[in-house]
Image (tube, helix red, strand yellow):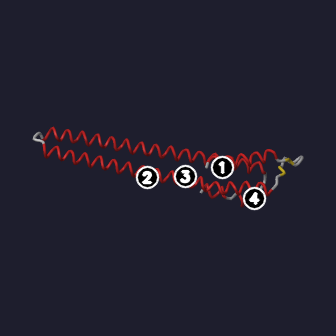
Amino acid sequence: MEQDLLALLDELEGYLSDAGRIPLTGKLMVNEEEVFEIIDRLRRAIPETLHQAQRTNRERERLMQQAREEGEAIVQEARAYAEKLIRESAISQRAQEEADRVLDEARRVSREIRVGAREYADDLLEKVEQSIHKVLTIVRQGRQELGPASGELQAAVGVEDEIER
């Protein structure tokens, strides 16, 4: 989806680069209909990028919940194992030490799973954030190249303000 946005932005940038200039003003002469058609296609592509970010966030939440559940299961299993060792062992001290070791290991593994899940989710969200930032930067550059926009063009590109919220 990022490719679709970038391709559309490249298309807009190419169109603006090829547009004729009004002598002595530096302003561009563009076919308004063509520019609005590209902007409309951009507008349709942006929601998919946002949906992708939402899916990534849901995946992160799912991974975090799974890590919590696995960690809790490991801790419960370790506790059960520890209790069994204490009950079955004639050497209570040795059983307690083994149980403590198993609990510590379970806690360590649980922490590692949670940290790994958080890092994975953070990496995914960072990539999505970078992609959206690149898109916004290119859109802003394209708008600046158009020069002062009419009220209609500002309304058509108003989607940028919605994204930043």
Q: In the rendering, at what x and y percent does residue 14 appear?
A: 76, 45
Q: In the rendering, at what x and y percent does residue 150 appear?
A: 78, 59
The kind of residue on which mark 3 rests is Ala
Q: Earlier in the sequence, mark 4 or mark 1?
A: 1
- Judging from the image, what secondary structure is the residue with disc 4 in? helix
Q: Earlier in the sequence, mark 2 or mark 4?
A: 2
Mark 2–mark 3 distance (CA, rounded to whole Å): 14 Å
Mark 3–mark 4 distance (CA, rounded to whole Å): 27 Å
Q: Earlier in the sequence, mark 1 or mark 3?
A: 1
Q: Nearer the viewer, residue 49 or 154?
A: 49
Q: Earlier in the sequence, mark 2 or mark 3?
A: 3
Name the residue at 13% across, 44% down: 88
> Is 86 displayed left or right of 153 in the figure?
left
Mark 2–mark 4 distance (CA, rounded to whole Å): 41 Å
* In front: label 2 or label 4: 2
- Judging from the image, what secondary structure is the residue with disc 1 in? helix
Name the residue at 38% across, 43% down: 113
- Judging from the image, what secondary structure is the residue with disc 3 in? helix
In the rendered image, the vertical position of residue 109 relative to residue 55, given as above or below: above
> Is 116 displayed left or right of 17 in the figure?
left
Which label belongs to residue 53?
Answer: 3
Residue holding disc 4: 153
Mark 4–mark 1 distance (CA, rounded to whole Å): 19 Å
